[in-house]
Image (cartoon, rainbow, N blue to C red):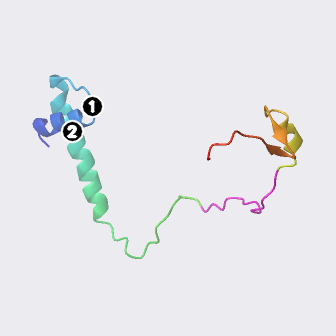
């Protein structure tokens, strides 16, 4: 990894990097890329993809449609209501 590539990466990431830190950052990025390349050598052909490192099952509730039983409380905030519904101005003629 050369310093020009590091400058370009920093520019794309909108990170300001001082010229004196470019060489150190180039070495660090090179080490990270080397580590990723090392991981690529591991045979994962028989490994199932995971979404988490722990077996988790999220609790689920029944998918039931309800009105919440708060119609009168909700309608109390409406400027106008009639027969249990909001009253709105006519918008289509």
Residue 11 point in image, percent of width and height:
21, 33
Furthest toward the bottom, the residue is 46
Q: Depth check: give the residue in front, 14 or 76.
A: 76
SS assignment at label 2: helix
Residue 15 point in image, percent of width and height:
27, 29
Residue at position x 53%, y 58% from top?
A: 53
Say if residue 74 shows up in the picture: no
Residue 72 in the image: above or below residue 54 = above
- Alpha carbon separation for disc pair 1 and 2: 8 Å
Residue position for label 1:
14
SS assignment at label 1: loop
Residue 37 point in image, percent of width and height:
25, 57
Say if residue 86 shows up in the picture: yes
Type of secondary structure dominating the magenta stretch: loop
Which span of residues is magenta-colored? 55-67
Residue 43 in the image: above or below residue 62 = below
Q: Depth check: give the residue in front, 80 or 17.
A: 80
User: Is 92 left, or right, of 39 in this rendering?
Assistant: right
Chain-order first, disc 1 or disc 2? 2
């Amino acid at each position: 990894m050369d310093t020009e590539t590091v400058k370009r990466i920093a520019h794309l990431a909108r990170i300001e990097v001082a010229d004196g830190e470019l060489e150190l950052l180039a070495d660090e990025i090179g080490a990270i890329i080397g580590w990723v390349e090392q991981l690529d050598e591991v045979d994962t052909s028989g490994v199932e993809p995971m979404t988490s490192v722990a077996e988790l099952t999220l609790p689920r509730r029944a998918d039931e449609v309800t009105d919440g039983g708060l119609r009168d409380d909700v309608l109390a905030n409406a400027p106008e209501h009639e027969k249990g519904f909001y009253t709105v101005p006519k918008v289509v003629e």
